[in-house]
Image (spheres, rainbow, N blue to C red):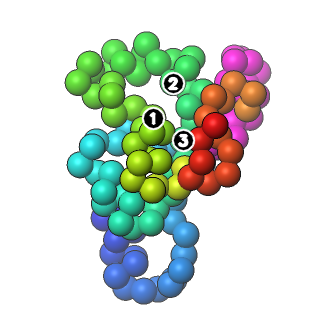
Amino acid sequence: MDALERAQRLGLRPGARHRIEHAGLMRPDQLPRFARLGVSAVVQPSFLRHFGDDYAAVMGAERVPWLYRGRAFLEHGIPSWVAPTAPSRTDPRCGPSSSWWGGPPGRAR
């Protein structure tokens, strides 16, 4: 977000629609800044569905609520997208049909 804020301040590309890929972990204090910058969140929620226990173990119990902040993005007016994931030859569960959250930017289903 620091780099995006600096780029916006420099005005090199006015009106550019920036996004952050893999926005799967976001602290509560980052949400207002994310929204103020007009950045879109691109997430892969199917990863959480299939690998959530691993994420929870790696991130720790105190950070689990910060994973995949779909509702918080909506509440803060942060546009969100689900990144298409190509079907995996090693794990077919990780294809596009496994996503539980999607639709047009800023709208969850």
Dot 1 falls on a residue whose secondary structure is loop
Indicate the quadrant containing the C terminus: top left, top right, bottom left or bottom right.
top right
Q: Magenta stretch containing residue 88, yes or no?
A: yes
Dividing the picture into quadrants, the one containing residue 100 is: top right
- Range drawn in magenta: 81-95
The residue closer to the viewer here, 28 or 22, is: 28
> Which residue occupies 67% across, 51% down?
104
Query: CB under 8 Å between callouts 2 and 1?
Result: yes
Q: Amino acid at mark 2?
A: Leu
Quarter the N terminus occupies: bottom left
Q: Which residue has dot 2 on it? A: 48
Which residue is at 59% across, 41% downward?
A: 108
Q: Residue at x 28, y 28 (%)?
A: 63
User: As shown in the figure, which amino acid type bears the numbered disc 1?
Assistant: Tyr
How many numbered markers are drawn? 3
Local crowd size for mark 1, using a 10 Å CA cut-off: few (<14), some (14–19), many (≥20): many
Q: Pointer 3: what residue?
A: 43
* Vertical side of 24 occupied by 10: above or below: below
Residue on which disc 1 sits: 68
